[in-house]
Image (cartoon, rainbow, N blue to C red):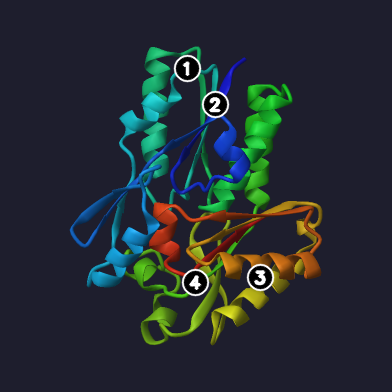
Amino acid sequence: MSFKIVVDSCCEYTTQMKRESCYVSVPLTIACNGSTFIDDDTFDQADLLHAMKASKDAPATACPFPQAFLDAYQGADDVYVVTLSALLSGSYNSAYQAKMLMAEDHPDVNVHVFNSCSAVSGQTLIAELIKELAESGMPYKKVVREVEQFISRMQTLFVLEDLENLRKNGRLTRLQAVVTGALKIKLFCRATPEGEIEKVGQSLTVKQGLVKLVDKAASDPDHVGRTVVISHCNCRERAEQVKLMMEMKCKFDKVVIVGAGGVTTVYANDGGIVVAY
């Protein structure tokens, strides 16, 4: 049985994933300061960062139309789809609508849409797990069960330099009271099991926040032996420092660093770090 893994463009590819033909990315679009950016191979991070700094308004992201997902579903017996949290974007709903359309024309094709309840590096982990399980010959329904169980246990943590884009786009519903009067405070946040953003702690600097992030992971007994993916927005050196701290304090089996694409750049903003395991 052939398979493919369809992701929206908030999923960050590792170097290995870029070499694998089983992954297909469906791009979101970004509107900022009069320009439109497509989150695909043409995306230029420096241009978007410049546009965000020059604009008085927050950039706006738009999820793919169902047809874009439907086109990506073609050509495999089993299709696994990974979208960013359904509570943060319409990407999940669009992918699910495409699944319904696919069922009408190709009822013999299996399509499952995973709500990552996360984003960025969390989606990376899910996509890599799907590939590992599917390549092992595991039946489609069992792959779905195993991955859904993994999603329920996965942790997504992040520290950002700037919360303005999240705040302006209404992605900080649980943090409004904190953010309103204290934007200069660096918040250490996580994704809730439902996929919303929740404050874990705060600090005066990003460095202090990242220490708290690493300590949080180290204190979680469920992290032992797992892979952790660190996504960074234009701050490779900072990501390397987080990796070093994790290698010293944690017991992850593997620590991987990935760069930020367009959607991640919008919400993590310049200097942001997102970690998932």
Q: Residue at x 72, y 68 (%)?
A: 244
On the image, numbered disc 4 is attached to which residue? 160
Q: Is residue 129 above or below residue 226?
A: above
Mark 4 to mark 1: distance in Å? 39 Å
Instruction: Classify residue 251 by image quadrant.
Output: bottom right
Say which quadrant the N terminus sits in.
Answer: top right
Mark 2 to mark 4: distance in Å? 33 Å
Q: Is residue 157 something one can see in this rendering?
A: yes
Instruction: Classify residue 32 by image quadrant.
Output: bottom left
Residue 12: give x, y in percent of width and height.
Answer: 52, 48
User: Which circle's residue, 4 or 1, is located before the other in the chain?
Assistant: 1
On the image, numbered disc 3 is attached to which residue? 241
Residue 28: give x, y in percent of width and height.
Answer: 35, 45
User: Which circle's residue, 2 or 4, is located before the other in the chain?
Assistant: 2
Mark 2 to mark 1: distance in Å? 8 Å
On the image, numbered disc 1 is attached to which residue? 75
Mark 3 to mark 2: distance in Å? 34 Å
